[in-house]
Image (cartoon, rainbow, N blue to C red):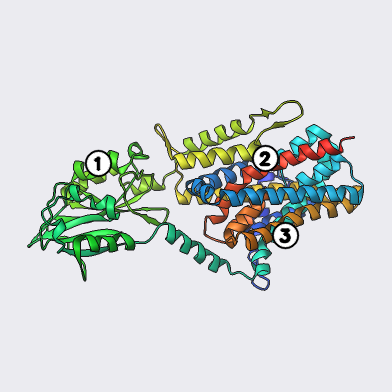
Amino acid sequence: MMNLLQSPYFALFVIVALGFMLGRIKIKGISLDVSAVIFIALLFGHYGIVIPNSLSDFGMVLFIYTIGMQAGPGFFDSFRSKGKEMLVLAAVIIGTAALTSIVTKYLFNLDAAQTTGLLTGALTSTPGLASARELTGDASAVAYGIAYPFGVIGVILFVKLLPRMLRIDVQQAEKELIGRKTEQYPEISHRVYRVTNPPVFNRSLAELKIRSVTGAVISRVKRGTNYFMPKADTILQEGDEIKAVGTATALDELTLFLGESLEGDMPLGEVLDLQTGLVTNKHIVNKSLAALNIHKNFNCTITRVRRSGIDITPTPDLQLKFGDKLTIVGSKPDLQELQKMLGNDTKRLSDTDFLPVALGIIVGTLFGKIVISFGEGFAFSFGLTGGILLVSLVLSSVGKTGPLVWHISASANQLLRQLGLLVFLAGVGSSAGATMVDTFAANGWKLFIAGALITLMPMLVAVFVARWGFRMNLLDLLGALTGGMTSTPGLAAADSMTDSTAPSVAYATIYPVAMVFLILAVQLISGLFAV
């Protein structure tokens, strides 16, 4: 058996299997879930079974890239709405960590190399360590190795215990976020009207500008016994019955506009049909509804667009994204032609093209190697993690570049993210476990205690600021904490606690800022305390 465990691939899957078994054990309702893999890996590492760094890096690259692809669509909206809060939290977390490291320097009589090593190890930041080693030498790497295990384990345990500490139910936090999202994207419904308002009699829809004035979309008209699709030049007549789709506010405004709201629904009639269509034709991705001019070209009306579980009102400037689900009204022949243009290929939606994935990771890796110099003594780069995260966020938001569609289906994203996460946790845990006992024996417990303080203090202060200063939702807080602590294993723990993408989006929003602040803090401490 021990010979088999010398094979990194066999050992990797043994660690993963045992981690899953441990993660399913619940004590007073708390379980470690997938995070348990790192604890099994620590034990294996202690006994000399270490997963190669190349495998660990492979897992980290996959995990970070898929996190960026998942978070990208909501990242820029989140930054616009919560950017100021995230900026403050990043400053609070890194500032508290830096101050704590300075306190421990005087408390335990440490030098600049040990101080910066503890700071970067407590926040598990490889780019930070690279900066510290460049400025203070290899001694920082020893302190980094001592602080790193608790930097990983401490954040995971803190994240897992935080809901209990705050007495907040995760499911309730999910409901709160859904409520806020509903306010941002109000539910779309339909209503039937009778035209009884004299000012709109004998006027065309183009002249009345109903869509731009009210925000509602007219899907069909009944005149007498005839049902037909409205056009821009359709003249409204007294007694016409109209079906419209929109938010409750838009439909209320349309009631005032047209005159009378009716009970019940309007049938489609013999000519019209209602269908849904999937956007899988890469040639129309990122094109607006106005540019496609679907009403004029296909004599069909789009009544709603469903994207990432949210119904969106189809405004003319709305750009279509790969995987959008459209609700369309029109005649069957016209709908068939429109479906051909949309693509409507469910198999293509579930397939994964690995060329964009590979190209995205290549670009992210190269971007992370760019070094930005700010004069003598200060240089900055995003590193492997930051480069891939930023590039994946941008590519996911862009959606399409020329013939390349960067989209990854939800099922493929989930599989790649889980695979990358498991490999990464096994590699990180086994590497830390290999040196943990030796570093304690050689350097004593003072460095470990200092590292633990640097890990814990920023999270405690950040929780206070986020919950009682910003009233931040628990799931946003979990993502902000792990991003501010630059802790990918911490994000993994938060991600396993909920189906919501909120922690990933918050992590992606705060992480780049926190990484820049951390490198600045390393530069400052090394400059202040250099011998």
Residue closest to the eye, 449 or 47:
449
Q: Residue furthest bottom?
A: 28
Q: Residue furthest front?
A: 199
Residue assigned mark 2: 516
Rendered residue at 78%/52% (across/down): 454
Residue assigned mark 3: 460
Residue 272 is left or right of residue 145, and the answer is left
Q: Residue furthest top?
A: 376
Mark with earlier residue (3, 1): 1
- Indicate the amino acid at tag 1: Asn
C-alpha distance separating marks 3 and 1: 54 Å
Q: Secondary structure at mark 1?
A: loop
Rendered residue at 28%/52% (across/down): 213
Quadrant position of residue 530? top right
Quadrant position of residue 496? bottom right
Q: Quick check: can you spot residue 284?
A: yes
- Indicate the amino acid at tag 2: Val
Q: Which mark is residue 293?
A: 1
Residue closest to the eye, 189 or 524:
524
Image quadrant occupied by the C terminus? top right
Q: Secondary structure at mark 2?
A: helix
| Residue 141 x/y as whole percent | 81, 40
